[in-house]
């Protein structure tokens, strides 16, 4: 079969061009370190890479949320621990005050301390986190949760909303504990068998006034109620503590997940240098061969031999 | 010898020509489309010498062109197929590069948006986070617009490419027609010059790379060319070439119409399936159109879903969230005739006023106005030249640059949602992160139960099963428009829909009827009507399943007014007319201007004729019992009818006026009987109140009849006057207003009388007036029939909008004639709004729901532990059974700035399957990119295969028609030697001749 001269040149040039572009592509791969320089190089992988990137970024988002939650929980824990300590002190005072050996002036002295402790408790109840949100106000984070009126009555201005945040694909973690749960109220049975709810600070206030009035029954009742308050604060402490440990374990799981996604992404995206360099040398070799053989063959012409 | 000489001469000539041919081949080595030429020689005619034939040498037969028709055709076809893959690969790869990259693709913008939403959900009160949310939302919107812009650019590029290719086809067709004309000069293809045929084949080859063609070669070598196949459109028919044109559809990229002869008899061409043109059309149809549509669908879904979530929550000011994104219309401006440099920008200023129809703007230089013409309706508007911005149909059009007279701009709105994707909410405080309602346990609760709130879907709320919508009765409260509605003590007869305003339902009852209205709410609260016994209560609540199942009957708000009314609605059962105020402009005191004045119109009622009853007994009779009717809050005494008397309007007016100091209502009675000129029968007699008019003589005309009646006024106490239309009206004389008027005819058998009226007693009607209102309600035992005595229709009047659907029962016997009047309902946007309420547990198994705003107990229901409470599309559930006395407040989440429930919904949108086929937003986008990528990959595979086929075809052609230098060199040597040999023959014959000449 005859190969025309034009055809000969054209074919050789086309092949050399193909090899050139293959070499250029490999060079781009080696320079960027990625198998896929442009999305159009391998459209099938584009979708997979997008998904992996999205998933990996989402882990970062979860990590950010965990940090926020952690900060919040730490602030809550600190306040609740301090509250617990103060309540222990109040309880001690209640035990001491209920002893028969004390006199009315002694009890009055104790009542002063109780009032001061009540102020400290109120300050703790109105803790703010680093962003200025009131920690124990439920969802009303710009409202001061506990305010005192002129009669010494403390009222709760927040709500009992639990704020939750996504910390992983499956897990939603509650960030706060509303004041109504931490500073829980107690049910008091009156002498006429009716039941009434008395707030946290109401109990302490009643204790202080019972001390002032030297009311031993009132002091006795306050002792039981303060013990109840202490018990519920312990429950809150346990709750916050458990959530903090959840945050820790979630952090570990998150870093595992992140690592996994990074590895998958790397497998799909990154270049295997050993293979790539080998392929490059093979391609360069064949290009050299093509070029030198073309140079040789194109020089052959019958006209050289015609005198 | 001459024969040897001629052989030699002939041979040299032959070989010289052969050498010329070979040289031609060598010279044309690099000429494109050149087919190798071969000089063919044939033997000369032998000459006969006796019995011996001597050859006469050789001569040039023909210079043939090495050409194989089948190989050529196969080369053309494979060239078409190969070039059709190119555009798809090229453009599809560009789309994949654009949309699939991390930096310019949509996925990263979507991820960033949801990441910021998640950060915001962790701290919704933070202004910093809110700002970042807005920033990333804006980034998402601009990414959509950018990608849409790039896709649009690709669309325009492909459009230009197609136009270019069509032009190429036209040019080549013209060239081919010219070649055909040249070829037509000879009659056989063998005689045609090879160069011309080469030119023809080259044109055909170029044409085939643009579009697949079918070639028919005629005997002269001229060709007919059809598009695509032997059944395709004819673009070159011998000497004529038909032009092609192309039309695009702006809204549908896949639609490309190739038109034959667009400026002559335009007709559609056959489809072009291959070649570069076919490849471009395929790309637009299969890939680009689908990609743009999918992307637009993605944009629309994104806007819709995000807005839906955002508008269902409340922002940091406590207001309901507004739309976060909006899709604006996009405008395509084309100005084919404009030569000057005009810059046009079109913006939507008022989405409501904008109509989606194309229009054109023309500059009229003499009048210095812009003329705007709507393309569909042809309506023309003008805009001043001085205006920087032209306002038209809700659009702001800005035109920069100088326009010449007659310059026309065609503006076409196109539906490209992705290109109009815009962020409209830029106020950080207006980001709705919180949910709109909140449920809280009261801190006085004894029980430990905690409540949580969720939103039930709207379909949970069921309307009443029975009953006719009052809107279907027609909006006309007149008696004449009444519709008969059957009474029933089991099912509602009518329904007042939610949101109905200014409703008046009037009932027209016969005398002595016991028909009554009863209005109930869905929770069994009896709002208007008459108190009913337990059996009737159960019957009401039991039959229609629209009543909430575990709700109990309550008559607490029955017929209440003011603060005691149900939900503080302004409602009346009875009769109601109010005074009104209006503002008027009147001249002011100085008479040099106007001032506003409030004009009050008193409440005024004109009743129908009062009922006519007779007391045949010997004792007086109560027409209306004591305390049966209540007027303006005052209980009225009994309306008595003395023995033997007839009831009359004047008596009733007197009765009403006895209470007017306390009720504020004054009543006057009147009685007018009108007879029109046609009714009056001057041939009949008439007796008024028993007195014969005219003393037996018939009056001459109507005036005379009136005079005759007036002549007897002092006896009858009835006077007459001629009305403007020429009829007669008779009424009571002064001092006797409202008395009954009896008409009769002395001839006992006559049905009517001179006035054309029936012979009977006519009662008067009442006119009631009050500066404040005239409000009749019922006391114990009062029924609409009692109002009918006074000539009034009883009705239900509702002023403010009904907060829920209300059922209207009609109890009693028979059917009632009901007429309705109401404010026409407006199309309200369907937004769920709930009003705050409190749930009080009266016992462990019963609770009541109180509407907080109006302090109305709207429902009393039974409760089973573990159930959730559904009210107003909200659902409350408890983690422990509530105790008696517990209360739970549901309010509008005031101050709940730290609440993130709505933002959590936004974050959850990332994985929500909102697209067709249950795909999430990111998945849908990835699918879009993959689809385009797949097309590119397929095309690449096809291209590689087709390349092989093409290469083989080229090789086959070259095998036949190509020039090989080695071959030509060999031929060169051959012919050169032959030439030398032939030259030797001449020399030899010369020598032979010399030897003959040498003989002396």
Image: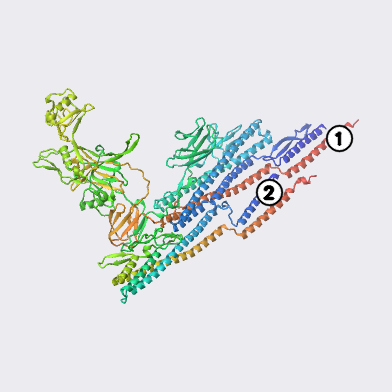
In the rendered image of this protein, does residue B67 appear above or below residue A115?
A: above
Which chain is disc 2 placed on?
A: A
Q: Residue furthest right?
A: B1000
Q: Residue furthest bottom?
A: A101
Q: Position of residue B682 (x, y in %)?
A: 17, 25
Which residue is the site of mark 2? A12
> Disc 1 versus disc 2: distance between alpha carbons?
55 Å
Which circle, 1 or 2, is nearer the viewer? 2
Q: Is residue B221 left or right of residue B749?
A: right
Q: Give the structural element (helix, strand or loop) at label 1.
A: helix
The quadrant of the rendering that contains the C terminus of chain A is: top right
Instruction: Check residue B991 in the rendering and tell me which mark sits there, or answer none.
Output: 1
Q: Quadrant of residue B50?
A: top right
Q: Position of residue B835 (x, y in %)?
A: 34, 52
Which chain is disc 1 placed on?
A: B
Q: Position of residue B792 (x, y in %)?
A: 21, 40
Tell me the colour scheme of the image: rainbow
Instruction: Check residue A96 in the rendering and tell me which mark sits there, or answer none.
Output: none
In the rendered image of this protein, does residue A295 appear above or below residue B188?
A: below
Q: Nearer the viewer, residue B45 or B624?
A: B624
Q: Nearer the viewer, residue B723 or B830?
A: B723
Q: Is residue B60 left or right of residue B539?
A: right
Q: Is residue B988 left or right of residue B133?
A: right
Q: Residue furthest front?
A: B590
Q: Give the structural element (helix, strand or loop) at label 2.
A: helix
- Give the class, few, some or many, for how many residues have Cα within 10 Å of label 2's Cα (few <14, many ≥20): some
């Amino acid at each position: 079969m005859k190969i025309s001269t034009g055809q000969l040149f054209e074919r050789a040039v086309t092949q050399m061009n193909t090899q050139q572009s293959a070499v250029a592509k490999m060079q781009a791969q080696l320079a960027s370190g990625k198998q896929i320089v442009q999305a159009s190089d391998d459209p099938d992988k584009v979708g997979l890479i997008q998904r992996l990137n999205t998933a990996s970024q989402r882990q970062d988002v979860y990590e950010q949320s965990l940090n926020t939650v952690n900060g919040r929980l730490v602030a809550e824990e600190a306040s609740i621990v301090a509250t617990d300590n103060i309540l222990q002190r109040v309880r001690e005072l209640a035990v001491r005050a209920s002893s028969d050996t004390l006199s009315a002036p002694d009890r009055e002295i104790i009542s002063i301390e109780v009032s001061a402790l009540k102020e400290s408790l109120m300050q703790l109840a109105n803790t703010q986190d680093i962003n200025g949100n009131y920690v124990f106000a439920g969802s009303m984070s710009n409202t001061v949760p506990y305010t005192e009126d002129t009669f010494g009555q403390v009222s709760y201005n927040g709500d009992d909303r639990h704020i939750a945040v996504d910390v992983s694909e499956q897990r939603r973690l509650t960030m706060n504990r509303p004041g109504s749960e931490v500073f829980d109220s107690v049910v008091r049975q009156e002498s006429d068998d009716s039941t009434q709810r008395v707030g946290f600070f109401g109990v302490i206030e009643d204790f202080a006034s019972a001390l002032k009035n030297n009311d031993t029954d009132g002091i006795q009742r306050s002792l039981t109620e303060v013990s109840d308050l202490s018990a519920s604060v312990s429950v809150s402490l346990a709750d916050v503590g458990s959530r903090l440990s959840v945050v820790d374990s979630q952090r570990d799981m998150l870093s595992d997940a992140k690592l996994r996604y990074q590895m998958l992404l790397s497998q799909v995206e990154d270049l295997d240098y050993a293979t790539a360099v080998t392929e490059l040398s093979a391609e360069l070799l064949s290009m050299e061969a093509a070029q030198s053989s073309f140079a040789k063959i194109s020089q052959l012409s019958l006209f050289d031999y015609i005198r | 010898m001459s024969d040897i000489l001629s052989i030699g001469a002939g041979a040299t000539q032959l070989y010289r020509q052969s050498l010329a041919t070979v040289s031609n081949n060598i010279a044309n080595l690099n000429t494109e489309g050149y087919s190798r030429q071969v000089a063919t020689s044939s033997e000369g005619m032998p000459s006969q010498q006796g019995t011996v034939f001597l050859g006469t040498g050789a001569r040039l037969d023909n210079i043939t062109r090495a050409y194989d028709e089948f190989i050529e055709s196969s080369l053309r076809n494979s060239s078409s197929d190969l070039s059709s893959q190119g555009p798809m690969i090229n453009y599809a790869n560009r789309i994949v590069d654009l949309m699939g990259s991390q930096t310019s693709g949509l996925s990263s913008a979507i991820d960033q948006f949801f990441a910021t939403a998640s950060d915001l959900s962790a701290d919704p009160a933070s202004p910093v986070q809110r700002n970042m949310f807005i920033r990333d939302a804006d980034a998402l919107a601009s990414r959509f617009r950018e990608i849409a812009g790039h896709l649009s650019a690709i669309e325009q590029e492909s459009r230009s490419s197609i136009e270019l290719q069509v032009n190429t086809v036209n040019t080549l067709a013209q060239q081919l027609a010219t070649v055909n004309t040249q070829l037509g000069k000879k009659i056989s293809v063998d005689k045609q010059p090879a160069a011309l045929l080469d030119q023809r084949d080259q044109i055909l080859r170029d044409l085939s790379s643009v579009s697949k063609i079918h070639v028919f070669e005629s005997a002269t070598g001229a060709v007919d060319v059809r598009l695509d196949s032997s059944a395709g459109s004819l673009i070159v028919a011998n000497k004529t070439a038909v032009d092609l044109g192309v039309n695009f559809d702006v809204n549908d990229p896949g639609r490309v119409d190739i038109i034959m002869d667009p400026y002559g008899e335009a007709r559609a061409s056959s489809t072009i399936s291959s070649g570069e043109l076919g490849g471009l059309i395929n790309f637009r149809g299969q890939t680009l159109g689908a990609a743009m549509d999918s992307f637009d669908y993605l944009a629309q879904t994104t806007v819709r879903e995000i807005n839906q979530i955002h508008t269902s929550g409340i922002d940091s000011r406590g207001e309901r969230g507004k739309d976060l994104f909006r899709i604006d219309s996009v405008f395509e401006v084309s100005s084919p005739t404009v030569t000057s440099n005009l810059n046009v920008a079109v913006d939507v200023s008022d989405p409501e006023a904008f109509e989606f129809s194309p229009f054109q703007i023309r500059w009229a230089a003499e009048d210095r106005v812009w003329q705007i013409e709507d393309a569909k309706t042809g309506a023309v508007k003008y805009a001043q030249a001085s205006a920087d911005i032209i306002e038209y149909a809700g659009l702001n059009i800005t035109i920069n640059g100088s326009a010449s007279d007659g310059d026309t701009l065609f503006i076409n709105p196109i539906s490209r949602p992705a290109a109009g994707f815009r962020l409209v909410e830029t106020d950080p405080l207006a980001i709705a992160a919180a949910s709109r309602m909140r449920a809280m346990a009261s801190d006085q609760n004894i029980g430990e139960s905690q409540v949580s709130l969720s939103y039930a879907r709207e379909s949970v709320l069921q309307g009443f099963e029975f009953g006719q919508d009052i809107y279907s009765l027609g909006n006309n409260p007149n008696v004449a428009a009444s519709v008969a509605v059957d009474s029933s003590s089991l099912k509602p007869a009518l329904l007042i829909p939610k949101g109905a305003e200014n409703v008046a339902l009037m009932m027209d009852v016969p005398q002595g009827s016991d028909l009554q209205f009863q209005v109930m709410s869905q929770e069994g609260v009896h709002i208007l009507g008459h108190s009913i016994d337990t059996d009737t209560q159960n019957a009401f609540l039991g039959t229609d399943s629209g009543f909430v199942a575990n709700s109990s009957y309550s008559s607490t708000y029955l017929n209440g007014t003011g603060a005691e009314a149900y939900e503080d609605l302004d409602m009346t059962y009875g009769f109601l007319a109010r005074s009104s105020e209006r503002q008027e402009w009147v001249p002011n005191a100085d008479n040099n201007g106007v001032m506003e004045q409030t004009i009050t119109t008193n409440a005024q009622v004109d009743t129908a004729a009062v009922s006519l009853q007779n007391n045949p007994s010997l004792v007086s009779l109560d027409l209306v019992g004591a305390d049966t009717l209540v007027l303006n809050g005052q209980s009225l005494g009994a309306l008595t009818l003395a023995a033997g008397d007839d009831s009359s309007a004047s008596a009733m007016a007197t009765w009403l006026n006895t209470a007017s100091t306390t009720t504020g209502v004054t009543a006057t009675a009147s009685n007018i009987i009108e007879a029109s000129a046609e009714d009056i029968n001057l041939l009949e007699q008439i007796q008024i109140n028993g007195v014969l008019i005219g003393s037996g003589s018939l009056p001459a005309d109507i005036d005379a009849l009136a005079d005759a009646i007036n002549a007897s006024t002092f006896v009858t106490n009835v006077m007459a006057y001629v009305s403007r239309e020429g009829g007669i009206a008779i009424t009571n004389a002064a001092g006797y207003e409202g008395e009954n008027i009896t008409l009769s005819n002395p001839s006992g058998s006559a049905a009517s009388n001179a006035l054309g009226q029936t012979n009977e007693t006519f009662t008067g009607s009442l006119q009631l007036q009050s500066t404040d209102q005239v409000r009749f309600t019922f006391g114990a035992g009062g029924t609409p029939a009692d109002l009918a005595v006074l000539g009034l229709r009883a009705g239900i009047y509702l002023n403010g909008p009904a907060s829920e659907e209300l059922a209207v029962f009609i109890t009693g016997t028979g059917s009632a004639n009901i007429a309705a009047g109401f404010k026409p309902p407006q199309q309200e946007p369907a937004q769920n709004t709930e009003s705050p309420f409190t749930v009080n547990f009266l016992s462990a198994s019963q609770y009541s729901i109180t509407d907080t705003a109006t302090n109305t107990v709207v429902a009393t229901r039974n409760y089973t532990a573990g159930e959730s409470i559904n009210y107003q599309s909200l659902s409350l559930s408890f983690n422990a059974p509530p105790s008696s006395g517990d209360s739970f407040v549901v309010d509008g989440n005031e101050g709940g700035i730290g609440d993130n429930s709505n933002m959590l919904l936004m974050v959850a949108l990332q994985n929500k399957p909102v697209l067709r086929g249950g795909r999430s937003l990111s998945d849908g986008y990835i699918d879009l990119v993959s689809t385009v990528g797949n097309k590119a990959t397929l095309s690449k595979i096809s291209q590689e295969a087709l390349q092989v086929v093409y290469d083989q075809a080229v090789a086959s052609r070259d095998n036949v028609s190509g020039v090989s230098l080695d071959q030509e060199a060999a031929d060169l040597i051959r012919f050169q030697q032959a030439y030398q040999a032939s030259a030797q023959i001449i020399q030899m014959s010369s020598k032979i001749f010399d030897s003959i000449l040498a003989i002396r």
